[in-house]
Amino acid sequence: MECYSRAIKTEKIEPDLKLLLHSNRAQAYINLKRYKEAETDCTVALQIDPNHAKSLHRRGVARYYLRDLREAKKDLEKSLQLAQNPEIKGEIENAEKEIDKVRYEQIARMMERGKMGRKERVRVKVEEMNEDESLKILEAKRKELEAELSAKPKKGVEEFLSDDEENELNQLS
């Protein structure tokens, strides 16, 4: 690694060689499970050539292990377009599965906390009025909302989800 670092810091290096040095060092970092350094080297390589398939692939792998799943998927998909490597399809599927798993866990946590659904905000027109009048108006609005909520039947979580989210929830069940 040390010889790579010295070579990369040399200003007389051709951009193509610098690209390869960063990309190859990124692979070495991935092998060492130093994913943040790998992502940084790939990003530098991609500044030289934004369509370098190996750097995109390696950055996608690094981001996958850093749990930046959406960005990992983007990098892997672009790499697949450029390189047509069938191995990348499996990595994209793994990223998609992890994204779905995270989404499902988030929905489950929200359901546990009772935070699913849309909350309506109370809007009161502000005018010049004294404190007693404004308190009476807010109290009346609160009672109105409580009556409205108690009159409505309890909704299940599914009624608050969009069609896509409901389909994903059903697939995960």
Image (cartoon, grey):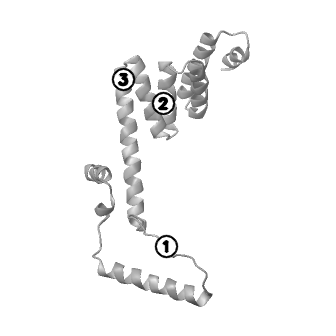
For badge 2, the amino acid type reads: Gly
Q: Earlier in the sequence, mark 2 or mark 1?
A: 2
Frontmost of labels 2 and 1 is: 1
| Mark 2 and mark 1 residues within 8 Å of each other at the beta carbon | no
Residue beneath disc 1: 123
Whichever of labels 1 and 3 marks the residue nearer the N terminus, that label is: 3
Q: Is 65 left, or right, of 129 in this rendering?
A: left
Name the residue beneath numbered marker 2.
Answer: 60
Mark nearer the viewer, 2 or 3: 2
The foreground one among 157 and 61 is: 157
Is the residue 25 above or below the residue 90 in the image?
above
Residue at image location 52% in from the left, 32% down from the top:
62
Q: Secondary structure at mark 1?
A: loop
Q: Secondary structure at mark 3?
A: helix
Asked whether, in this view, residue 168 is left or right of residue 67, the answer is left
Q: Is residue 132 left or right of residue 123?
A: right
Q: Quadrant of the N terminus?
A: top right
Compared to residue 107, the image places residue 27 above or below, namely above
- Residue type pointed to by label 3: Glu
Q: Is residue 58 above or below residue 139?
A: above
Q: How many marks?
A: 3
Lower sequence index among marks 2 and 3: 2
**Residue count near mark 3 (Cα–Cα under 10 Å), binned few <14, some 14–19, many ≥20:** few
- Say what amino acid the circle numbered 1 marks: Arg
> Of 77 and 68, which appears nearest the observer?
77
Q: Residue at x 46, y 70 (%)?
A: 121
Q: Looking at the picture, how far across and down is residue 11, in whole percent?
A: 73, 13
Q: How far is mark 2 from mark 1, CA to CA?
A: 46 Å
Q: Report which residue position mark 3 lands on.
A: 87
State how far apart marks 2 and 3 are (Cα): 13 Å
Q: Position of residue 104 (x, y in %)?
A: 37, 52
Residue sitting nearer the eye, 161 or 12 = 161
